[in-house]
Amino acid sequence: MTAREYLTQARMIDSRINSKLMELQRARELATKATGLVSDMPRNPSPDLQQMESRVVKIVDLEREINAEIDELVDLKRDIRELIAQIRKPEYRTLLELRYLGFRTWDAIAEEMGKAQGDPSIMNLWVHDGSKDLTVNRMLYRELLRDSLDRIFETEYDHMKDCIESKVFGIGLESYTVGSNDFYIGYGPSRGKIVTLDTGHFHPTEIVADKISSLLLFIPEVMLHVSRPVRWDSDHVTIMNDDTLELCKEIVRCDALDRVHIGLDYFDASINRIGAYVIGSRATQKCLMQALLEPLAQLRRYEAAGQGFERLALLEESKSLPWNAVWDMFCLRNDVPVGEEFIADVQRYEAEVTSKR
């Protein structure tokens, strides 16, 4: 049994109890109704006591089952609470308690998280739906998705923002994806939802950075799901490559640092998890810093004057600017490892902490 399966047992038992309580209520109503019908029949002073007794026995048995499951639920919740208490971070404990002891929806939990941190949380929705082979009813399935999303988003939250994510195709969806990029580009602005751009959810020849300015004209915010796709949506660890750098440059060029949310993907588990987090985070920060150091004002003056040669020359020269010296100073001022010094820290953490879990 996985940890998730163990934790979800409480919700399943609670659902069974609620179902049986409804069944018990119906049984009592039927028994009361049957008693009333018998009492209103003067011609038959001897009602079917055996049938009545059978109904009462069933009610008693059901009550016994419910009480037994309530005891089981109480014991299981106690065990889960003790297990969750072993987690060091209080925010993680709170999240798990809300989900697996309070049976809250993820939307409601995200609302609580946003309220607690004083900054709205982001709830991303991606629907893996489509067809492996040819379909002749694209419109129907997209109408169903539109209507379903409308129902999902009926509840408005003050401290949580919804966003929606598309994909060009997926395993089992090779021929048709209901929630395509075109679908969500239409749905998002029309419903006031944030659109998520996953760097691995487009054709390899598409430039995701080019989509940011188009979206920002019609929606207030954009969510980026940044990974490193290798030939498909492989979710390799984010690195400082041309794609990530171009994304960050476009955010800065659009003056949209306060309108673009950046989420990094670490799905690839082939390397140390902590190392993956550090590499991806530092790579993205380096790209953002290079974007901020770009001589943008001069570049735009060249472009406005039609000086294409000068613009291209400065773009090329800016690639070799000593940005790494600025990065090292940034690390020093924030008391974090400079250069490859973090490798030893990650190795030490793995030896002293993660390997002992």
Image (cartoon, rainbow, N blue to C red):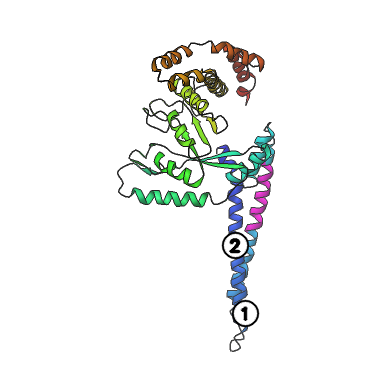
Q: Is residue 128 visible?
A: no
- Measured along the vertical axis of the image, is residue 253 above or below residue 27? above
- Of residue 241 and residue 215, the one placed in the foreground of this image is 215
SS assignment at label 1 = helix
Query: x and y percent of residue 9 in the render?
Result: 59, 46
**Residue located farthest toward the bottom when viewing the structure as drawn:** 43
Residue 272, located in which quarter of the rendered image? Answer: top right
In the rendered view of the protein, which quadrant contains the C terminus? top right
The reply to whether the C-beta atoms of the residues labelled 2 and 1 are less than 8 Å apart is no
Residue 307, located in which quarter of the rendered image? Answer: top left
In the rendered view of the protein, which quadrant contains the N terminus? top right
Q: Residues within 10 Å of mark 2 (few under 14, many from 20)?
A: few
Majority secondary structure of the magenta segment? Answer: helix
Q: Which residue is mark 2?
A: 22
- Of residue 355 and residue 347, the one placed in the foreground of this image is 347
Q: Is residue 133 visible?
A: yes
Q: Which residue occupies 58% across, 79% down?
A: 48
Query: x and y percent of residue 232 in the render?
Result: 39, 29
- Of residue 49 and residue 303, the one placed in the foreground of this image is 303
Structural distance between the alpha carbons of marks 2 and 1: 21 Å
Q: Amino acid at mark 1?
A: Gly
- Of residue 340 and residue 100, the one placed in the foreground of this image is 340
SS assignment at label 2 = helix
Q: Which residue is mark 1?
A: 36
Judge whether residue 70 is colored magenta.
Answer: yes
Q: Which residue occupies 59% across, 41% down?
A: 6
Q: Residues within 10 Å of mark 1 (few under 14, many from 20)?
A: few
Q: In the image, which disc is placed on residue 98?
A: none
Number of numbered discs overlaid on the protein picture:
2
Q: Which residues are magenta?
A: 65-80
Closer to the chain start, of discs 2 and 1, is 2
Q: Amino acid at mark 2?
A: Met
